[in-house]
Image (tube, rainbow, N blue to C red):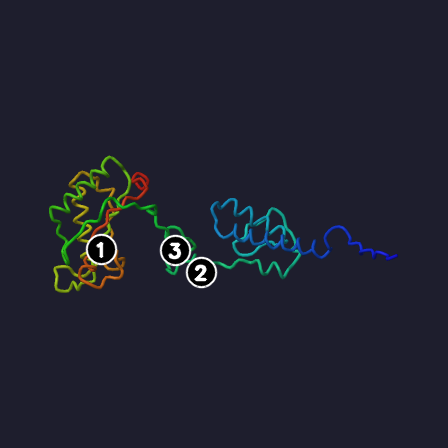
Amino acid sequence: MAVKKRKPQVAAGAPAWMVTYGDLVTLLLTFFVMLLAMSEVKKDERFVDFMQAIKAAFGYVGGVRSIPPDFTQIPRNVQLAKLLIIPPNPHDLSQSPDEGLRGKRRRVTYIRAGKQFAVGSPVWFPPLSAALDEAQLAKIAEQAKQLEGHSTLIEVRGHCSRLPAEDSVFENHADLSYQRARAVSQALVRFGLAPERITLVAAGTIQPVNYRAYTQAERQQNDLVEILQIDQNVDEFRP
């Protein structure tokens, strides 16, 4: 009579190495989530609290840009404490001997930063000209009607093509783009907009609308003025 062989019994549950492996993978995932959360600072207060918690967990005290704690704590890992020292960012320091209004450690900020929206189509100009024809004046009048009754900021940005300006009445491309922006600004004021709402920008040939302009028709696409509305109120900048 044949005797059946018994199958070896396998211990229930996962092997011990798999539990350790799972813990390590989970910790690694948590570490990358922490790095992702630190990649963008949206609220300074929460970020400072988070950094203080990390420093407390690693036993780190002091260093550049650190916030002094309420008590003295001896670091548990001196080598790690040295690695956690955050050096000053050279971009945060001004290169001018004059400290300015905000000191040498303050970054220069663009006080009129904000989302910009194009108001209608651009105002076109003939090559090497800052004169407005009747069709473009009618376009400006229509755009001024859209902007009337509001107090948002308006940026009038002048552009020009790379057509040589030495033989024209303008000193250079910057002068040409400024005169174009000035002509559009004066037209907007004439059609009822408050002059304190308008900011002039002479972009010249630095910010072309069509970068790959090779033919005359393509180059003429950069002979224009943009009327941009900024989502900030002019009253915010009044004293």
Q: Residues within 10 Å of mark 3 (few under 14, many from 20)?
A: few
- Relative image position of residue 49 (x, y in whole percent): 55, 46
Label 1 amino acid? His
- Can you identify the residue that label 3 sits on? 99
Quadrant of the rendered structure where residue 98 is? bottom left
Q: Is residue 84 left or right of residue 185?
A: right
Farthest residue toward the top?
A: 149
Amino acid type, label 3: Glu
Q: Disc 1 to disc 2, how far (Cα)?
A: 34 Å
Q: Which mark is residue 159?
A: 1
Mark 3 element type: loop
Dot 3 or dot 1, earlier in sequence: 3
Q: Amino acid at mark 2?
A: Pro
Residue 99 in picture, x, y percent from top left: 39, 55
Looking at the image, is mark 3 or mark 2 nearer the viewer? 2
Given residues 31 and 168, the one toward you in this image is: 31
Point out the tag, 3 or 2, that comes first from the N-terminus.
2
Q: Position of residue 3 (x, y in %)?
A: 86, 57
Mark 3 → mark 2, Cα distance in angstroms: 15 Å
Q: Are marks 1 and 2 in contact (CB under 8 Å)?
A: no
Circle 2 residue: 90
Answer with mark 1 or mark 2, whichever residue precedes in sequence: 2
Q: CA distance from mark 3 to mark 1?
A: 34 Å
Could you say which disc has been placed on residue 43 in the image? none
